[in-house]
Amino acid sequence: MKHNVFIVGGSGYIGSSVIPHLLTHEHEVHALIRSQSFLKISLDCGFILGDVLDNKTYKNKIINSDTLLHLVGAPHPNPFKKDLFLKVDFKSVEQTLEAAIATGIKHFVYLSVAHPAPVMKNYIEVRKKCEALIYQSGLRSTIIRPWYVVGTKHYWPYLLIPFYKIFQNIESTKETASRLGLVTLPQLTKTIIQAIEKPPTNSVRIVEVQEIQNGL
């Protein structure tokens, strides 16, 4: 089944990988972008200029879409950006959910983060708040929870592999090492495509790291 997908955050690291694959699979794609991001979007993709933090700028443009893919997040997250996480990450989910409900979106796909985790507590707390909003919305949804995503210009997590090997062989840390495992950009892209093409039958589906690594 082909889908009409509306993407917020389509010009970023993940979106720029997902959009070409959606188009290859013959889905119709429209991406919400800011004017300064115009050159980052695939020319084969429809685009809508607007502000993700204000759904009045795009709500009437997503009426024909059946799926909304949310990829927005504060750039280069670190432990000191709590205010930015609330302003960008939380607010964008709040606004897109409101628009999705108003326009009859059938499937809301959200890129979250694996948790619990011993680091990035402020980031994770805001993402958990975003997930709570999704549950409260009543929309059929998929929440995808990667940890570090390895890909072009994002190779530094490979330095962590020796530590992962050690922790995966220690009984007390095995579960955490698995839950917070590394995923590659192609693995995450494939998972997002699969999630869109195979929406949950009802309620909210959670996709953890091992499912991203192995496929849905």
Image (tube, grey):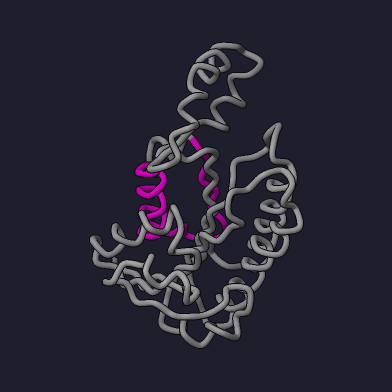
Q: Is residue 1 left or right of residue 87?
A: left
> Does the segment drawn in magenta span residue 29?
no
Residue 211 vertical position relative to residue 91 in the rendered view, above or below:
above
Residue 151: image location, x then y, percent: 40, 41
Residue 213 vertical position relative to residue 189 in the rendered view, above or below:
above
- Quadrant of residue 150 in the image? top left
Numbered disc total: 0
Residue 165 vertical position relative to residue 144 in the rendered view, above or below:
above
Query: Which residue occupies 59% across, 41% down?
Result: 114
Q: Nearer the viewer, residue 112 or 208?
A: 112
Q: Quadrant of the C terminus?
A: top left
> Does the segment drawn in magenta span residue 197?
yes
Query: Which residue occupies 55% across, 45% down?
Result: 145
Query: Which residue occupies 51% across, 45% down?
Result: 207
Residue 75: image location, x then y, percent: 58, 54
Q: Is residue 12 left or right of residue 98?
A: left
- Quadrant of residue 147 in the image? top right
Residue 164 vertical position relative to residue 151 in the rendered view, above or below:
above
Query: Which residue occupies 48% across, 32% down?
Result: 156
Residue 84: image location, x then y, percent: 70, 59
Magenta stretch bounds? 185-209
Q: Nearer the viewer, residue 64 or 51?
A: 51
Q: Quadrant of the N terminus?
A: bottom left
- Quadrant of residue 65 in the image? bottom left
Residue 206: image location, x then y, percent: 55, 48
